[in-house]
Image (cartoon, rainbow, N blue to C red):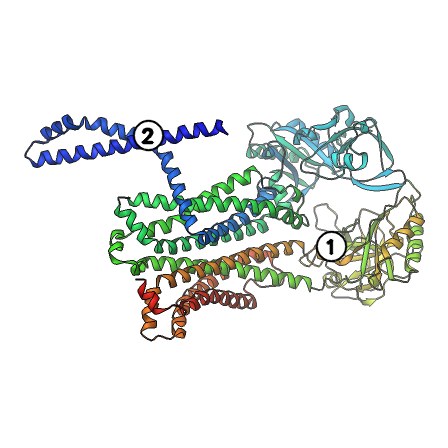
Amino acid sequence: MSWFARPLRKLRALFKRQQLDADMAEEMQHHIELQIEENLASGMSPAEARLTAQRQFGHVEGIKETCRDQRGWMWIHDIFQDLRYGIRQLKKAPGFAAITILTIALGIGASTAMFSIVNRMILHPFDYEEPEDIVLVRAIQLPEKTEVMISPGTYHEWLRQSSSFESLSVIQGAISELVQGDRVIRLFTPSVTANYFSVYRIKPILGRLFLPQEMQPGKDSVAIISDGLWQTRYGGREEVLGESIRLNERTYTIVGVIHDPHRKGKYVNTPNTFASEDKNFSDRRLLPQARLKPGVSLEQAQREMDLIAQRANLEHPESETKYGIKVTRATDSWVEHFDLKAQLFTLLGAVGLLLVIACVNVASLLLARANVRQQEIAMRAALGASRRRLIRQFLGESLLISIIGGLLGILIAYASMEPLVFLASKFMRNAELIAVDGQVLFTMCSVMLVSGLGFGLVPALQATRGDLIGSIKEGSHNVSGGRDRQRVRNALVILEISLALVLLVSSGLMVRSLRAMQTFDQGVRTENVFGSSISLNFENRYQTPESIVSFTDSALERIQARHDVKFAAFTVGLPMDLGQGGVQQRNFILEGGYEPTAPTEVQLSTDRYAVTPDYFKVMSIPLIRGRVFTAHDNTNSARVIVINREMVSRHFSDKDPIGQRIRLLDPGPEIWSEIIGVVGDVKPRGPQSPTDPQVYQVFNQEPYRLMTLEILAKGPAPGLATGVRDIISDLDKGIDLKTLYPFQATIAYSWTKQRFNMILFTLFSAIALILAAIGIYGVISYSVTQRTHEIGIRMALGARPNSVMRLILISGAKLIGLGVLIGTAGALASTRLISSLLFNVSPYDPVSFVVIILLLTAIALLACWIPARRATKVDPMIALRSE
């Protein structure tokens, strides 16, 4: 290390030489000024006095210039000197250093972890090149202002008339079945135009992208697979290029492999030939996205597309539907779609509050310690240190605490990323991308420095004000720092308690909200219910409704024959929207009721399920009126349906629904179905979702190849999954049956966001509570230390230990009471901000407020009791002798 030590020694020698030169120059200037004063006192004129001094000591201006030159070199030396001084002070008080550094580490660590989530999910959700230029171009149906897809003809009109976009592409989503031998795997298979990849600037990691001529029918038998599919299904082999991949009924040739930083997993891109139908203006199935040209703003693109929309409406006056065009940044659309902004910014505000509590805590401890060091500060002032110099040294010490604590906090954030990402991944897409990256580090380093200056400035100003030299004459028993410093210290403790109360109340409301959600009746059974999605291979033998019904009937007969199964059923559509079929919405009309004649007129809609007869028993959905399905309701019988109570209250409040008829509209055959029963309401998308009208159809009358198997077991049934898998495999070895999952986990999934909020708020609140307890303990403890002389006199004059303890506790209780009072007012105002995150709990819930206030008060009083108890152990003679 000599290569490093030699320059370091030279730099140190240079600093010493520059310091000596500066000291000599300042000393010489000081003597010249004294000589001038003596010459003036002897009766010389000002000019004579200055000339005489110059002859004796040299030219004054030259001396001043030398001093300025030397000071230019000294600022680096002063920084190192302040840091060395701060390190020595922290070494003298290791307990104080440990508490303050750990306090800042907790605040910075929590802030870093939370900001990492906000940065990835809201501020910078995409890893594409120049993501701010990627926009979504949506057609808006007027006057409802609802977003709709566009037709191929509209797409080509936009291509010809727009000049704001570097690339304008469309995508058409699809789900296909990947056939590999006897296995069938369902994949996302979006069809895209050739310029889609230029919008996102995605380059192939193997092979090539689509060619423009491959967007024509007959030339589109090529596919580009994701790196996720490439690694899992093809072992990452480069020989995959040119191999065939079979999707549904077609065979494609793999020509490339891509890595999309935003879309993970297994999927296949195919060419979009539908977009080439430039005369088709009626079929709307395309979603457009584009990249702005360099120098073109979002506002300019919006103005151009507004003109295009107006021109299109004028060119087609016969159309009853008018459309507008909306251009939005893809990042903004992403944040709005997943509804994360309010939640994450609320959590960021909570962690910001925690950081403020940490800074207030350290500021109060620094101020209390500065009062103990008053003799030292006064001695430094007596030796010539200016107030500015003393403040700078205090700030150097606080910055040192902030830097060390901040670095430790960043390490804590790194360590907490894995569990935090695991929690976030339950409801945030691409949560695995959350990381403490360069942007987060830069931001938190800035926060670190600002925090250090923030919590160090108040103690520095308070510790260096007043008559410092007089403190030496007054003695150590008067180092309390005066009433002003006492008031500042008390104000910091009150602020800390009030902020902690705000966080604790928010946490209490989150806990109550989650509890209310978990006990809420969502209309379905969860205990001992298991399910799995099943997809029947179209190419195999399920090309007719009868073949699908034959499979489901055989499967249900064999599964229900098991000794550990109570009931079993198939369904298309599953509450919580987690089944492969999902909850479908269909428009409908009532017999004898209003039937829309124009596309813009409002249509009635309902959630639609197709179920086998025992579905209501499996899910424990109660029958209210009429009957449910039986084995006699099949393909050959009349069409029948069952509706829920909400459907009755909205559309049949004035008549008996049994016997009435409903016709479900496209897709599917539009056939009138008779209502035969009414069942209870089910929350389809979690407890916070509204209860919509629901229609249940007979599965055998509307068979689908994509379905969900639901089983009500008689107990835990450990061998159920293996047994069901064997039954399905015996019926068709090509069916990929996933492991049976407990439906209770599906219900719990709807609580994930609330659980995430509750865990973080509770964690932040626990840290805030600990910091508040440490803060009040530290201040009361320092106060007891400063009042040792007073306590000794009181006890020497006969004061009992209980009265001394009562004296200390009363002073602490006053601070706690004021903090609780202010914090309660702050909590009443701030809890309205989290009302959107609560479920069935008022933001002013009295139980939460009372319990949290009692908890905080008890812990704060305990923090006061410990130093108060120590005060009762003071020996009066030792306390007086020390003075």
Of residues 697 and 497, which is closer to you in this image?
497
> Of the numbered discs in the image, which one, if any, rests on residue 576?
1
Q: What x and y, as percent, mark residue 714?
A: 85, 64
* Number of callouts: 2
Q: Residue furthest left?
A: 43
Of residues 81 and 826, which is closer to you in this image?
81
Rendered residue at 9%/28% (across/down): 48
Secondary element at image label 2? helix
Residue 63 visible in the current orientation: yes
Q: What x and y, as percent, mark residue 377?
A: 31, 50
Which amino acid type corresponds to the residue marked 2 in the rendered image? Arg
Q: What x and y, as percent, mark residue 352?
A: 50, 50
Q: CA distance from mark 1 to mark 2?
A: 76 Å
Secondary element at image label 1? helix
Quarter of the rendering containing residue 46: top left
Q: Nearer the viewer, mark 1 or mark 2?
A: 2
Quarter of the rendering containing residue 645: bottom right
Quarter of the image with the C terminus in it: bottom left
Q: What x and y, as percent, mark residue 606?
A: 75, 54
Which amino acid type corresponds to the residue marked 1 in the rendered image? Met
Residue at the disc numbered 2: 17
Of residues 226 and 53, which is closer to you in this image?
53
Q: Is residue 677 left or right of residue 800?
A: right
Rendered residue at 80%/62% (across/down): 528
